[in-house]
Image (spheres, helix red, strand yellow):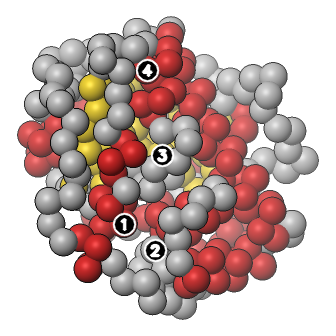
Amino acid sequence: MSEAPKPPISRHELAEIDTTVAHSARVYDYLLGGTNNFAVDREVAELQAAAIPGGIERSRKDIRANREFLGRAVRYMAREGGIRQFLDLGTGIPNADNVHGVAQQAAPDAHIVYVDNDPIVLAHAHHLLKSTTEGATAYRDVDLRLPQQVMQLASPTLDFDKPTAVMLVSILHHIPDSDDPWGIVAQYMDAVPSGSYLVVSHLTKDVRPQEMAALEQAPPPDARYMFVLRNRADFTRFFDGLELVDPGVVTVNRWRPDADSPVFAEDPAFYCGVARKE
């Protein structure tokens, strides 16, 4: 099952990174306070935040709330759900609270596979290959919209006959309806056994509708990504056939907050949910 960590860069990926066009992973990294971004990413982040009351600081608080949800969800699944396998789809640029760090703190024998197809994520993927001796981590450079290929590439590290957490955190709002994101998610969940979990967070314009609609309808210049901000009904469809864990579909700040969770005067514009396959 386990495999020794290997250097993630087998191609000349750095040559493919376009520093003149903003990318969602690098914008997200900037909002999280990271340094793996370029001037164009920072400019786009500031431009997007300018339309939001509270500006860049409010945007960063929302993004951080989404990231903290990820941590709480992983801890819940590792501790209460008994999950020892995590498939993190659209993982983004590594930072201080990656899935393996959270999961293996709760369960040292946890196995994690990260999936992304962004060259800059690949360039930093060595940070994702650290693991406890009991567990394992791997990175796969593949488009999450290809579930069969993803599962095949992840199978040396994950045993898909055992319960697995399928995680799509802050990524599905970049996939248009024409790509059938609901069908993509269903393919992953059909491929994992009973006892598996699905974790999703997603931007919405149900919260702060005017500013979020503007974000969706006017994509920033010099950006290589788009937003599809789905409503509660469309978001909840991702969990069809699964049993939602309490408190169900809520904004990210309201999913099992702990004593250290920040207080929000207005909810972040992110829906989230965790569901179990029976």
Q: Residue at x 39, y 45 (%)?
A: 127
Say if residue 243 shows up in the picture.
no
Q: Which residue is mark 4?
A: 104
Mark 3 and 4 residues: CB-CB less than 8 Å, in contact?
A: no
Q: Amino acid at mark 2?
A: His
Tell me the CA gap for discs 2 and 4: 30 Å
**Which of labels 2 and 4 is toward the front?**
4
Mark drawn on residue 23: 2
Q: Is residue 120 above or below residue 8?
A: below
The residue lying at 47 percent from left, 64 percent from top is 25
Identify the residue position indicated by label 1 in the image: 120
Position of residue 129 relative to residue 270, above or below, is above
Secondary structure of the residue carrying tag 2 is: loop
Give me the C-alpha separation between circle 2 and circle 3: 17 Å
For disc 3, the marked residue is: 169
User: Does 70 sit left or right of 213 as displayed?
Assistant: left
Location of residue 161 (image quadrant): top left
**Residue type of the residue flagged with mark 1:** Ile
Q: Earlier in the sequence, mark 1 or mark 4?
A: 4
Q: Earlier in the sequence, mark 2 or mark 4?
A: 2
Q: Give the mark nearer the N terminus: 2 vs 3.
A: 2
SS at badge 3: strand
